[in-house]
Image: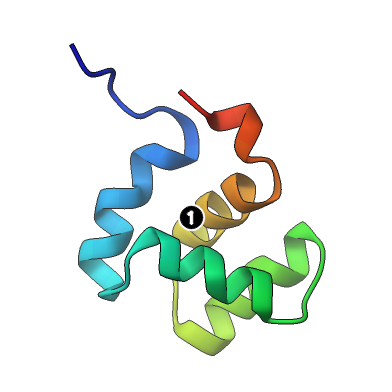
Amino acid sequence: MATKPHGPASYFPTIEAKYGRGIDEWFTLLRECGVAGHKPLVEWLKTEHGVGHGHATALVQYHLNPAKWAA
């Protein structure tokens, strides 16, 4: 039986549906944006891509520490 996503990953289906990009695409953008640190990355997603604060935070949390959130 598949486990239900937890933590930031629980937001991923909604993020994909709302903003029209796959999660891997978001992580590529985060890697290549030239911005470092949690708060600056969240602000970058919000200002450059119109991502809401909660969704931006979920993406950045997972991006910065994927091992913590792996199933």
In the orientation shown, which residue stands out farthest toward the right?
Answer: 36
Does 37 sit above or below residue 10?
below
Tell me the quarter of the picture where residue 68 sits. Answer: top right
In the orientation shown, which residue stands out farthest toward the top?
Answer: 1
Query: Picture coordinates of residue 63 (x, y %)?
Result: 62, 52
The quadrant of the picture occupied by the C terminus is top left
Taking the image as shown, residue 53 lies to the left or right of residue 18, namely right
Q: Note whether residue 48 is visible.
A: yes
- In the image, 54 versus 28, the foreground residue is 28
Query: Picture coordinates of residue 37 (x, y %)?
Result: 81, 62
* Residues packed near mark 1 inside 10 Å, few (<14), some (14 to 19) or many (20 plus): some
Query: Picture coordinates of residue 36 (x, y %)?
Result: 81, 68
- In the image, 60 versus 3, the foreground residue is 3
Instruction: List the residue tagged with mark 1.
Output: 54
In the orientation shown, which residue stands out farthest toward the bottom?
Answer: 48
Numbered disc total: 1
